[in-house]
Image (spheres, helix red, strand yellow):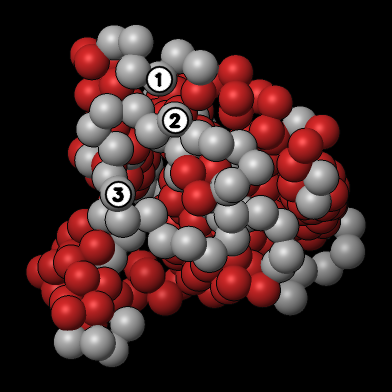
């Protein structure tokens, strides 16, 4: 316990205020996106129609958009590689704790996003929205699910990871954020999501990742990870690599296996 007036106490107090402020801002953005998503004719459909008007004009562009939309090498793999870069760029226990707990928070946010897709009443995906009459670009994957698309679980996780890279003060932070925006907007072009789905997903990822940055959780996680990494470095790396792969691909292999067994 740190005494009031000490440097550590003041630092933790300031960090706690920053976390609460950022969670509040992200929550307001999420709420705003949800309100707008509830009236798709006011924003989502007009903007998506405009974007969709460029479909099938270029086979090359459609193919690029389809690849960005479907291949995790362009989204999760890039971001997790940058997360590893952040990890090895610092030996600071607190810094590594922030990276680890933030990454796990981004993953948890993706789970919350999937629950919200099933519980919130918003809109179907553009490709399934009869009011939009969506013109599918060439190369589109035909197996999009038919439940509501707000908020995007892909964007929730990957925007959360980009935020972790920013929190880690990585020199790649601007690239990570810009690249994530570039890649994930392909989901609108391919009919997987409306614009508010992306904004809502990014805000949800920010809410959860920022919430993980509270000083007491960082301190506890830092001590736990440090002990584990020092006592069993090989097991730590094995688990970290396996989990990184699963997060980068959003557990695709495991979900596919469970689905084929009719468990998922």
Q: Position of residue 52 (x, y in %)?
A: 50, 23
Residue appearing at x 67%, y 47% in the figure: 200
In the image, farthest residue toward the top: 57
In the image, taking residue 171 as reference, residue 256 lies left or right, namely: left
Q: Looking at the picture, does residue 25 appear above or below residue 51?
A: below
Q: Earlier in the sequence, mark 3 or mark 1?
A: 1
Residue count near mark 2 (Cα–Cα under 10 Å), binned few <14, some 14–19, many ≥20: some
Residue count near mark 3 (Cα–Cα under 10 Å), binned few <14, some 14–19, many ≥20: few
Q: Looking at the picture, does residue 124 appear above or below residue 88?
A: below
Mark 1, residue position: 55
Mark 2, residue position: 135
Image quadrant where residue 9 sits? bottom right
Front-lying residue, 151 or 211: 151
Mark 3, residue position: 142
Whether residues under marks 3 and 1 lie with C-beta atoms below 8 angstroms apart, the answer is no
Q: How many marks?
A: 3
In the image, taking residue 208 as reference, residue 57 lies left or right, namely: left
Q: Earlier in the sequence, mark 2 or mark 1?
A: 1
Q: Earlier in the sequence, mark 2 or mark 3?
A: 2
Image quadrant where residue 250 sits? bottom left
In the image, farthest residue toward the left: 234
Real-space Cα distance between discs 2 and 3? 13 Å
Q: Is residue 212 visible?
A: no
Image quadrant where residue 126 sits? top right
């Amino acid at each position: 316990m740190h005494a009031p007036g000490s440097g550590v106490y003041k630092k933790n107090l300031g960090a706690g205020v920053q976390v609460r402020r950022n969670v509040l801002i992200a929550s307001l953005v999420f709420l705003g996106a949800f309100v707008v998503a509830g009236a798709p004719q006011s924003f989502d459909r007009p903007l998506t129609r405009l974007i969709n008007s460029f479909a099938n004009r270029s086979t090359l562009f459609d193919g690029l958009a389809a690849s960005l939309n479907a291949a995790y090498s362009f989204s999760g793999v890039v971001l997790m590689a940058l997360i590893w870069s952040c990890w090895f760029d610092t030996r600071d226990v607190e810094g590594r704790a922030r990276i680890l707990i933030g990454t796990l928070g981004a993953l948890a946010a993706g789970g919350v996003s999937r629950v919200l897709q099933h519980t919130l009443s918003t809109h179907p995906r553009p490709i399934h929205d009869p009011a939009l009459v969506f013109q599918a670009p060439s190369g589109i994957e035909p197996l999009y699910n038919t439940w509501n698309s707000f908020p995007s679980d892909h964007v929730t996780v990957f925007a959360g990871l980009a935020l972790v890279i920013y929190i880690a003060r990585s020199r790649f932070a601007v690239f990570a954020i810009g690249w994530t925006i570039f890649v994930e907007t392909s989901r609108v072009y391919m009919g997987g999501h409306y614009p508010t789905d992306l904004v809502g997903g990014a805000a949800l990822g920010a809410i959860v990742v920022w919430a993980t940055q509270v000083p007491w959780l960082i301190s506890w996680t830092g001590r736990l990870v440090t002990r584990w990494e020092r006592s069993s470095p090989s097991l730590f790396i094995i688990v970290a690599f396996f989990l990184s792969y699963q997060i980068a691909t959003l557990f695709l292999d495991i979900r596919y296996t469970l689905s084929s067994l009719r468990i998922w």
